[in-house]
Amino acid sequence: MTYNRTENIGKSTSQGQHDKLTHLIQSCKYPQFKHKLPNNGNGSNTVVNLSSKQLSADAVNVLTRGLNYAPAPRKLPVEDIITNVENTIFRNRIPRSDAECLRQDVSSLLRKSSPPKSNIPVKEMSALRDLRNDSDILVLPADKGNATVVVDTEAYEQKITHMLSDTTVYKQVSYDPTARVTTKTIKLLQSLSDKELVARLRPQNPTPPKIYGLPKIHKPNWPLRPIVSQIDAPTYNLSRHLATILQPFTGKTNTFVKDSRHFVALLEDVRLQDTDIMISFDITSLFTNVPVDETISIITNILKDTDLPTGYIACVNHCLTTGYFLWRGEYYLQVNGVAMGSPLAPVVANIYMEWFEGQALASAPVRPRHWWRYVDDVFAIVNREHVAEFVGHLNSVHGSIQFTTEEEREGMLPFLDVLILKAEFKVIFSLIGPE
């Protein structure tokens, strides 16, 4: 049953990606511009070696498969299977007689089963083991572009340490905040009337969040984007629930971009003037610069006009103001912004950005002809003479929200995974590969 399910998921995912690729390629109605698209060849751009070590051809080949590729195990994970079966029996309160039958069936299957055939050549498997055993390098996913990145461990740790030295965002403490955050989380949950929901959201054996960084290979000296993994953290279940509650309140503006396909549809009827220029805007470290108090106030105003329990406001405040994590045995509080990695963070950032852009565009001395936003990435068409004035206005609205810009070059501008081309006062578009 598990095998058939994974096969169906694989086929469905593959078909979905194929359909999206076909749609984007067919969207380019101007074949004469396709020669300008980057050629990714056989996937060489999917592995970026930023370390001081030379990678073998076998190492590159195995990394090209992607970090989600699952090598076939050399032996069956018997202990993991038995543990998961026992956990399932316990969680579903299966009667003792039925549970014993399940155990016997699983035991019989395990005795008869053999490991699957290897799905990686011997040389590549050997290279993979060498990569795993080399403590001097780390293999990470890129922040953008779907690439696999190899970096020196020492350089990576230096960048994390330098990042944590910013006392405006992080504060090192001498204690483990897990117990006090757990206690407060349980107390807030008790204010909710739905006892079944409270039981589901209650933290079970919580552990401290962990920080790691994703290299931004499209920027000089590959700075890291900090990610705080909240899985099994005291507020993880509550944050996931609050994210589902708040999600329907986002994406209601006419500036909202859902995904690449939606963006392409928005460009369909765009006509340019000879004074127009295409610009993309990017906010410098949006998540760590989201003003939490103002965002909580915005969410409070949203929720007060709904039938949702008033206790949710206190829960949102709790999840956004008790951020902390563990790094190399030391504990840090996040004293500013929200942590990317929390289920609540993207929703909260979107809510704030919708409010921010409403204020910014309404008060702009000169408004762009078009403005579309995907989280903190913005595509705009602005009068060339007013670019500096408009950028200055955006950066004056709030001190913590600062924009960087990228203007079109030779009539081309990348945005999301689409390359926008300008010709004959029209905007056309094509698929581009990983940066």
Image (cartoon, helix red, strand yellow):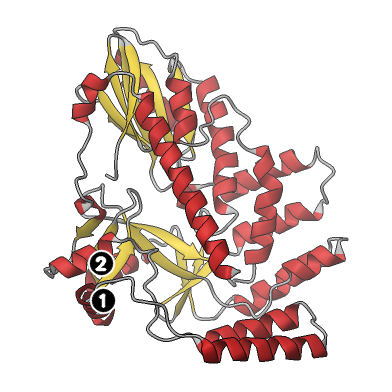
* Residue in the foreground of this view, choosing between 43 and 106: 106
Amino acid bearing label 1: Met
The part of the image, by quadrant, that contains residue 24 is: top left
Mark 2 or mark 1, earlier in chain: 2
Task: Answer above or below: position of 209 versus 388.
Answer: below
Tell whether label 1 touches label 2 (CB within 8 Å). Answer: yes
Residue 162 in sight here: no
Report, in whole angstroms, how far the alpha carbon at label 2 lies from the one at label 1.
8 Å
x 20%, y 64%: residue: 60
For label 2, the crowd category at 10 Å Cα-Cα, with few meaning under 14, some 14 to 19 and many 20 or more, is many
The part of the image, by quadrant, that contains residue 91 is: bottom right
Amino acid bearing label 2: Val
Specify the farthest residue to the right: 193
Residue picked out by circle 2? 62
* Residue in the foreground of this view, choosing between 412 and 369: 412
| Residue 259, position as x, y percentages in the image | 48, 37
Specify the farthest residue to the front: 112
| Residue 317, position as x, y percentages in the image | 67, 56
Residue 112 in sight here: yes
| Residue 384, position as x, y percentages in the image | 30, 15
Task: Answer above or below: position of 370 versus 288.
Answer: above
- Disc 2, SS: helix
Q: For residue 125, which numbered disc appears in the image?
A: 1
x 53%, y 26%: residue: 255
Q: For residue 370, which numbered disc appears in the image?
A: none
